Amino acid sequence: VNQMKRIIYISRYSILSILLLACSCYAWAQNGVSFTAAASANKMGVQDQIQFTYTIIDAENLRAVSPSGGSFKDFDILGGPYQSTSTNVSIGADGHMNRSESISLTYVLKPKHTGNLTIPAGIAKDAAGHVYHSNAVPVQVVAGSVARTQRPQSMMSDPFDDPIAAMQQRQ
């Protein structure tokens, strides 16, 4: 009898969990705007550059995307914003079409000083007046440079060249 009560309790708990998960997924799909920020590194030298990107997914009629406060106060902007867009369309087995659109703004930044700096969260606004906030990104900036030095270009530039012949030429 205790075994049967236990099975019923586990079954109820499992069904409730599945229903909550399904409702959460449905709610996310209805208002599935995602706004994130990401950097190419979390540690850098004060002489280095970093690529930083705001990406917003499924926001309709986007009007503006900018850093909160309007600027990157601890960083100089060396390039950007470079905008890229992406549209993904998939058709499920039931014939239902799913569409997702994203817009990314990428900046090339250089820190103004050393320390534990924060690249500010982004703010995005759409035509309906909705405001979206991304995450801020912490970056540790140390003296000098931590960037990997570039390897010298190989003598073999064409991937279809003969590697044996290229090695013989270097000798």
Image (cartoon, rainbow, N blue to C red):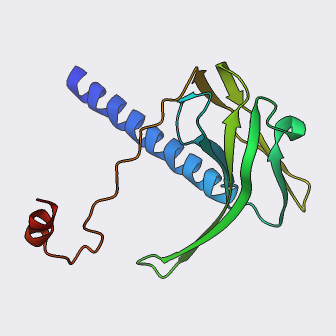
Q: Nearer the viewer, residue 146 or 53?
A: 146
Which residue occupies 68% across, 37% down?
110
Q: Is residue 44 left or right of residue 82?
A: left
**Residue 145 visible somewhere in the drawing:** yes
Residue 56 x %, y %: 68, 55
Which residue occupies 40% across, 46% down?
150
Q: Is residue 170 left or right of residue 13?
A: left
Residue 79 x %, y %: 72, 52
Q: Nearer the viewer, residue 55 or 90?
A: 55
Q: Is residue 21 left or right of residue 126?
A: left
Residue 112 x %, y %: 73, 28
Res. 45 image quadrant: top right
Residue 147 x %, y %: 48, 36
Q: Quadrant of the N terminus?
A: top left
Q: Is residue 150 left or right of residue 58?
A: left
Which residue occupies 24% across, 20% down?
2
Residue 139 vs 52, above or below: the answer is above
Res. 136 image quadrant: top right
Number of labelled discs?
A: 0
Q: Nearer the viewer, residue 64 or 26?
A: 64
Which residue occupies 48% across, 30% down?
146
Q: Quadrant of the C terminus?
A: bottom left
Outermost residue, front side? 171
Outermost residue, bottom side? 95
Residue 71 vs 162, above or below: the answer is above
